[in-house]
Amino acid sequence: MRPTDMVLSPRGLRFMGRTFPCAIGRGGLTGNKREGDGATPRGAHDIVGMLYRPDRIAKPAGWAVPIRPGDLWSDDPADEDYNLMVGAPYPHSHEALRRADPLYDLLLITDWNWPRAVRGRGSAIFVHVWRKPRHPTAGCVALSRTDLLWIAPRLRHGVKLIVA
């Protein structure tokens, strides 16, 4: 663990000497993640991408990629593109990345079960904006918009999300 890693603790998400209130999955923490269980997987997860809504926020970091209309994330364990970003039209189960609500205005992609996904081990484990303070997620880690916007430009290559 390095000082630049994001570390989930009972008090919140620690990063660069600060602790931010956060939310985790409604299923709590798990060492045996399964698709649809609502749990946040334990482990050291690399942050492998940053996506943002360019129509809602400024580019938060040089390596951030805009979310375009039609960008989706496959959550269908039966599909070969399971746990990968895909584009519409897409006939399998998926999650829209360009949402009407602000949850995915800025999101960090973890390497949970990625890039070669084991079918059924869980998909779309992100760090994103919370629905409301500490409101449980479907398995992701969520923060306030203000806190995530503070964190994003400070992330560097190799940062991990540590979930103990």
Image: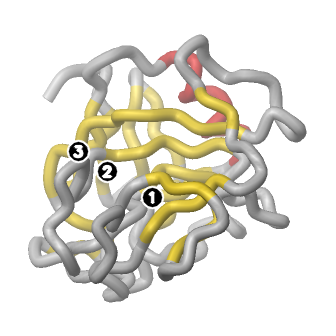
Of the numbered discs 2 and 1, the one sitting upstream in the chain is: 2
Direction from residue 41 to residue 37 in the image, left or right: right
Q: Quadrant of residue 95?
A: bottom right
Mark 1 residue crowding within 10 angstroms, few (<14) / some (14–19) / many (20+): many
Q: Is residue 6 visible?
A: yes
Under mark 2, the amino acid is Leu
Q: Amino acid at mark 3?
A: His
**Mark with earlier residue (3, 2):** 2
For disc 2, the marked residue is 8
- Which mark, residue 141? 1
Residue drawn at x 16%, y 45% as measured from the top left: 44
Above or below: residue 64 compared with residue 148: above
User: Is 57 displayed left or right of 158 in the figure?
Assistant: right
Q: CA distance from mark 3 to mark 1?
A: 12 Å
Horizontal arrangement in the rendering, residue 120 relative to residue 66 (left or right): left
Q: Quadrant of the N terminus?
A: top left
User: Looking at the image, which is closer to me, 31 or 124?
Assistant: 124
Mark 2, secondary structure of its residue: strand
Residue sitting nearer the eye, 5 or 77: 77
Residue 120 at x, y = what percent? 22, 80
Compared with 140, 8 (above or below) is above
Callout 1: SS: strand
What x and y, as percent, mark residue 127?
48, 50
User: Three-letter amino acid code at disc 1?
Assistant: Val
Above or below, comparing residue 32 to residue 60 in the picture: below
Q: Which residue is mark 3?
A: 45
Q: Residue at x 11, y 77 (%)?
A: 32
Mark 2: few/some/many CA within 10 Å (<14, 14-19, 20+): many
